[in-house]
Amino acid sequence: MKKVYIQTEFQKLDKEEQEMVTSFREEMEAANVEVEVREHFQREDVIDLSHVKDHSMEQEDYVIAFCENAAEAEVFSLQNVPVVSYEPKNCEHIAHPKTRYVVLSLEGIEEHYLKKVWCRYFGFPWTILETERTVVREICLKDIEDLFHLYEGDGITDYMEPLFDREAEIQYQKDYIDKVYGFYEYGMWVVIEKATGELIGRAGVESRNTEDVDQVELGYVIRKDKQNLGFATEVCRAIVDYAREELGMSSVRARVHPDNLSSVRIVEKLGMKPLSKKVNSDGEITFQILFFTN
């Protein structure tokens, strides 16, 4: 199911925004997305999504409401439909105070955005990218057992921090999913092997102790029995490309202990160069790949 509700006083929109709404509706309907535009919605007019407690709908599915009126937005919230505050010119109402997303126009809104709003609202893991052999996606709480299994491998924590105890790790991941993914739109993700469907690693980028908002740090770990098969290089190369092309980062760094020779080789394969031969307080060397300079 793919459906978009648009609650707006259409006749009060300026001509340009009316054209945007019409164009958006035509584009969505051409993509087999049902679009319903009204000034007022009653609760019985809206699909009830109170049953959506886990990922019972496919990630390709979504139901989203754009609302410019707080009272109307509440109707959708009661039906558990994700709401985006819609605040075009001449909008006389502030939409719903609990909405996480706000748009001033429907111009440029694509399915990618709608799917992400849907996943963020229900806490479904967003698929970041795919490589030839893997899927890289956001972590979810169902991954916790596999995560502990990953970190139990010999030597896995030789050069990185271990997980917290189980209860603390579950709470940490809950907060991470809600605050880090929701705010930054990136972070540490999980690596799923396509051939088996198993979680075989973690990898991603984070902001680390830097004032440069266009710079992130790469991190990764691959399950012990899947090491030396090229997975780390395959995944990390795709993530570096994602950081440049999708996140708009100007550089990616990686901190590597000089004794961790396999990781040194991997970051060098990615085109990273050491910033200095000096080690930091943790005994690590910082490598960097620079995409462009001003």
Image (spheres, rainbow, N blue to C red):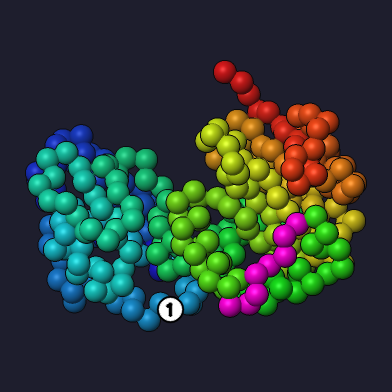
Q: Residue at x 79, y 29 (%)?
A: 276
Whether residue 131 is situated above or below residue 138 in the rendered picture = above
State left or right for residue 233 relative to residue 109. Answer: right
Residue 163 part of the magenta-drawn span: yes
Name the residue type under label 1. Lys
State left or right for residue 41 relative to residue 291. Answer: left
Whether residue 68 is situated above or below residue 79 in the rendered picture = above
Whether residue 180 is visible to the viewer of this picture, yes or no, is: yes
Residue 246 quadrant:
top right
What residue span does the magenta drawing correspond to? 160-167
Q: Position of residue 151 (x, y in %)?
A: 76, 68
User: Which image quarter holds the N terminus?
Assistant: bottom left
Q: Residue at x 40, y 57 (%)?
A: 117
State left or right for residue 193 relative to residue 36. Answer: right
Label 1 sits on a secondary structure element that is: loop
Residue 202 quadrant:
bottom right
Q: Position of residue 124 (x, y in %)?
A: 50, 67
Residue 61 part of the magenta-drawn span: no
User: Which image quarter holds the C terminus?
Assistant: top right
Prevalent SS, magenta region:
loop
Q: Residue at x 58, y 37 (%)?
A: 210
Residue at mark 1? 53
State left or right for residue 152 relative to residue 116. Answer: right
Mark 1, Cα crowd under 10 Å, few <14 / some 14-19 / many 20+, is few
Residue 212 quadrant:
top right
Number of marks present in the image shown: 1
Whether residue 38 is visible to the viewer of this picture, yes or no, is: no
Residue sticking out furthest to the bottom? 51
Along the line of sight, the residue nearer the viewer: 46 or 148 = 148
Q: Position of residue 125 (x, y in %)?
A: 54, 64
Q: Residue at x 54, y 34 (%)?
A: 211
Q: Position of residue 150 (x, y in %)?
A: 76, 69
